[in-house]
Image (spheres, grey):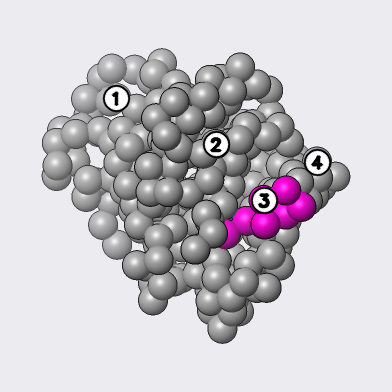
């Protein structure tokens, strides 16, 4: 069987990098998408290749349709198209309470989040439909279901992503394409390293497993949903938070 291709948007650091390593270990050719972190992405690709895996670093801003289309065209023309999409690119937002936040601040996050996910999923699904196989995995957040102060823009955008995922699962299932949400709680990454230690300790002690997630914890869930073995699992919401959030 030909090597399957996995594209990880925002793949150079944190959760994305852990997903790239995990999928490469599982035999996928991984495409590490980045915007600005060229050296970090190249280093990761070289690390994967040094361990016997296949990896390609590819620059594109997933909010830019032209760049996004160019990336998918390259993967299609040179490697046979995307089989697995891990939609992980981080979209910045303005952390503010609702009563202090403007619509422009709120809608910027909502639009960036959904635009990137929508366009990348559509490009991926068109390639997957031809093969009658595909895995769409969207990185959401437990904040979509469990609100926290100042995260209204982030949580609402991820909530829209969660709903979008269900529609894709329903529409694309007949073509052998699954769509699932992976929703991390607090994860130890560069993005959270400056969070107050008291806050991290509060999260840890109120989590049943008594630990804060690592990027590998999230990647291990992603690698299962990307695998051949998960073909009858679609439309799901999978919190990776040690039981800190339970539906």
SS under mark 1:
helix
Mark 3–mark 1 Cα distance, whole angstroms, equals: 45 Å
> In this view of the protein, which residue sits in the foreground, 23 or 137?
23
Q: Is residue 82 above or below residue 25?
A: below
Mark 1–mark 4 Cα distance, whole angstroms, equals: 38 Å
SS under mark 3:
helix
Mark 4–mark 2 Cα distance, whole angstroms, equals: 20 Å
Q: Position of residue 91 (x, y in %)?
A: 62, 37
SS under mark 2:
strand
Mark 3–mark 2 Cα distance, whole angstroms, equals: 12 Å
**Horizontal placement of 150 versus 123: left or right?**
left
Which of marks 4 and 1 precedes in the sequence? 4
Mark 3, residues whose alpha carbon is within 10 Å: few (<14), some, or many (≥20)?
some
Q: Where's the C terminus, which quadrant?
A: bottom left
Q: Nearer the viewer, mark 1 or mark 4?
A: 4
Q: Which residue is mark 2?
A: 55
Q: Position of residue 42 (x, y in %)?
A: 59, 23
């Amino acid at each position: 069987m030909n090597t399957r291709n996995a594209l990880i948007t925002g793949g150079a650091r944190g959760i994305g990098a852990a997903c790239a390593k995990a999928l490469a270990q599982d035999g996928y050719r991984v495409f590490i998408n980045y915007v600005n972190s060229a050296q970090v992405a190249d280093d990761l690709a070289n690390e994967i290749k040094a361990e016997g895996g296949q990896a390609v670093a590819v620059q594109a801003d997933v909010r830019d349709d032209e760049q996004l289309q160019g990336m998918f065209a390259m993967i299609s023309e040179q490697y046979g198209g995307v089989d697995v999409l891990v939609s992980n690119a981080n979209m910045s937002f303005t952390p503010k309470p609702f009563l202090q936040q403007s619509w422009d601040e709120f809608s910027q996050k909502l639009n960036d989040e959904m635009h990137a996910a929508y366009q990348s999923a559509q490009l991926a699904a068109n390639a997957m439909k031809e093969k009658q196989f595909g895995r769409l995995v969207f990185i959401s957040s437990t904040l979509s279901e469990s609100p926290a102060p100042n995260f209204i823009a982030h949580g609402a955008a991820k909530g829209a992503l969660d709903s979008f995922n269900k529609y894709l699962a329903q529409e694309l299932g007949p073509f052998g394409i699954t769509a699932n949400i992976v929703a991390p709680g607090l994860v130890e990454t560069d993005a959270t390293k400056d969070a107050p230690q008291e806050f991290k300790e509060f999260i840890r002690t109120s989590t049943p497993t008594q630990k804060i997630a690592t990027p590998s914890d999230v990647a291990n869930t992603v690698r299962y949903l990307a695998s051949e073995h998960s073909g009858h699992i679609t439309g799901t919401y999978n919190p990776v938070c040690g039981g800190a959030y339970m539906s």
